Image (spheres, rainbow, N blue to C red):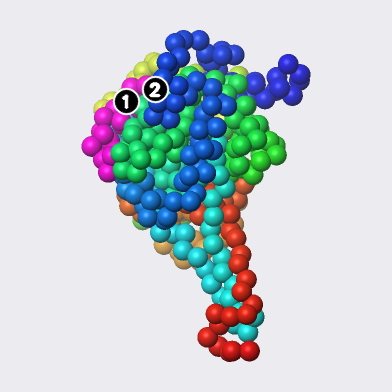
């Protein structure tokens, strides 16, 4: 194995599961291809390509039937799926996963957003249509396994593609179940097979092989910066959803009680594993104490002892600067218990005062630990927020009544999602606040993806006619 292959393998191993060996051992399925599950990449991709060659010629009504079958089929399983995700991954909360699954199923637009655009004039008719790529190679995270399968499935299939989905080893069982059920629902409704395929045993090699496979037309990767980078240098078009470190700004004009409620509610939602979730608060000094007091009223636990804070840093952040997976998505009480830090009640979020260079401020922790950085005025708040967001351009929020400052912050942050006076999970569609956003492609620029993101925009010209303005 040459140096490049070793480097790729190391990155994929770190981000897709360090416990995964070169090829995971275990019994393979004896029913190769049953309900979209195959034993190797070549067979899976070949099946998805054959399915696409049929699917691409089907009328739009068939795509609608596919999407309806997915939505109706999963409806009675949502609570069970949420429990299984929690049990297998050990991350987040069941209630949050129910909300995320509902969001993926019912807030993800389908073929209806792919209406063609037309222009007419002296030069005749110009029409733009949205056409599929073919077989999409998707990689999903353990933080949102079934949710990503469902949302990606609806978007990509609505656009006329078929999908090879690379399961995260940390959620392989529920991911496989979700893909199998999706195929069952679609087959029962349409007779179509293998619109989404996957492997019975995920491995690092299978991800590498899929990325390099000549019949994969497009890559869609939701994960850390390393695996997104590998996809981007594959030579294929890539839609990459990478890291974020979302700041929540609070200025002196804000409704402090509402801001505290929204921040605690959102940062504790699924134990802060959403990449959009508030990872640090940057507040004006004049309202900082009131904000902290209100956050405590909302269920946050304020950590003030420096030794306890240092202990928490050492326990949750590894020597290489990455958050320790043992604590990712865990309850605040579990983290406090493991650190032997005493507390009262049942806190859902751990907060502490910190400066802009603190490890908790600069690390995407993906756990319910949120530092609060104070600044003398709004201009300093905005400068600091830009700095700690670190140029990911992913997500940011502001709590303010000053429209000028809101506008200035939205412009300067330049993030894919910007939330004003609300919880940042609203930027993902949770709470029926617009289209679902589970693949937020900031590194590659698509932002919150929809079916349109997974199409090629094609142009048709008819110079000789179809203009109502003139005849010649």
* Magenta residues, dominant SS class: helix
Residue assigned mark 2: 173
| Residue at figure coordinates x 65%, y 21% from the top left | 9
Residue 7 falls inside the magenta stretch: no
Judged from the image, the secondary structure of the residue bearing numbered disc 2 is helix
- Residue 204 coordinates in the image, percent (x, y): 58, 21
- Residue 55 coordinates in the image, percent (x, y): 46, 46
Sequence-wise, which precedes: disc 1 or disc 2?
A: 1
| Residue at figure coordinates x 40%, y 32% from the top left | 179
Mark 1 and mark 2: span between their CA atoms? 9 Å
Seen in the image, is 466 located left or right of residue 437? right
| Residue at figure coordinates x 63%, y 32% from the top left | 213
Part of the protein shown in magenta? 72-88
Quadrant where the C terminus sits is: bottom right
Q: Are marks 1 and 2 in contact (CB under 8 Å)?
A: yes
Disc 2 crowd, CA 10 A, few/some/many (<14, 14-19, 20+): some
> Against 178, is 432 above or below?
below
Seen in the image, is 172 located left or right of residue 40? left
Q: Can residue 116 be seen from the camera position used here?
A: yes
Nearest the eye: 198 or 423: 198
Residue assigned mark 1: 84
């Amino acid at each position: 194995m040459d140096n490049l292959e070793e480097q790729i393998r190391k990155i994929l191993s770190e981000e897709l599961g360090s416990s995964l060996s070169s090829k995971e051992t275990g019994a393979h399925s004896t029913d190769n291809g049953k309900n979209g599950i195959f034993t190797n990449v070549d067979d899976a991709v070949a099946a998805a390509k054959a399915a696409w060659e049929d699917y691409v010629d089907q009328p739009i009504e068939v795509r609608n039937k596919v999407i309806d079958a997915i939505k109706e089929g999963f409806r009675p399983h949502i609570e069970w799926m949420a429990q299984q995700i929690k049990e297998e991954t050990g991350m987040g909360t069941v209630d949050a996963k129910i909300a995320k699954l509902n969001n993926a199923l019912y807030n993800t637009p389908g073929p209806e957003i792919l209406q063609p655009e037309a222009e007419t004039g002296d030069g005749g008719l110009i029409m733009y249509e949205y056409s599929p790529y073919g077989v999409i190679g998707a990689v999903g995270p353990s933080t949102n396994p079934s949710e990503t399968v469902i949302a990606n499935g609806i978007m990509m299939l609505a656009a006329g593609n078929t999908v090879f989905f690379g399961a995260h080893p940390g959620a392989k069982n529920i991911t496989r179940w979700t893909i199998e059920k999706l195929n069952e629902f679609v087959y029962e409704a349409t007779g179509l097979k293998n619109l989404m395929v996957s492997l019975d045993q995920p491995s690092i090699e299978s991800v590498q092989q899929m990325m390099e496979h000549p019949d994969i037309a497009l890559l869609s990767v939701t994960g850390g910066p390393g695996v997104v980078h590998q996809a981007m240098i594959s030579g294929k078009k890539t839609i990459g959803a990478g890291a974020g470190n979302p700041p929540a700004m609070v200025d002196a004009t804000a409704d402090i009680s509402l801001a505290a409620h929204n921040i605690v509610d959102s940062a504790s939602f699924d134990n802060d594993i959403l990449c959009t979730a508030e990872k640090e608060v940057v507040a004006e000094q004049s309202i900082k104490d009131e904000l902290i007091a209100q956050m405590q009223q909302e269920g946050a636990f304020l950590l003030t002892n420096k030794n306890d804070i240092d202990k928490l840093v050492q326990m949750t952040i590894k020597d290489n600067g990455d958050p320790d997976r043992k604590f990712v998505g865990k309850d605040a009480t579990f983290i406090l218990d493991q650190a032997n830090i005493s507390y009262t009640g049942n806190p859902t979020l751990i907060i502490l005062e910190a400066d802009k260079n603190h490890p908790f401020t600069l690390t995407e922790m993906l756990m319910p630990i949120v530092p609060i950085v104070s600044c003398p005025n709004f201009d300093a708040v905005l400068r600091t927020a830009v700095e700690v967001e670190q140029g990911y351009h992913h997500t940011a929020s502001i709590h303010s009544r000053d429209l000028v400052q809101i506008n200035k912050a939205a412009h300067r942050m330049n993030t894919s999602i910007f939330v004003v006076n609300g919880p940042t999970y609203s930027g993902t569609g949770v709470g029926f606040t617009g289209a679902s956003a589970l693949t937020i492609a900031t590194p590659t620029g698509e932002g919150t993806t929809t079916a349109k993101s997974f199409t090629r925009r094609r142009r048709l010209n008819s110079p000789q006619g179809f203009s109502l303005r003139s005849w010649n």
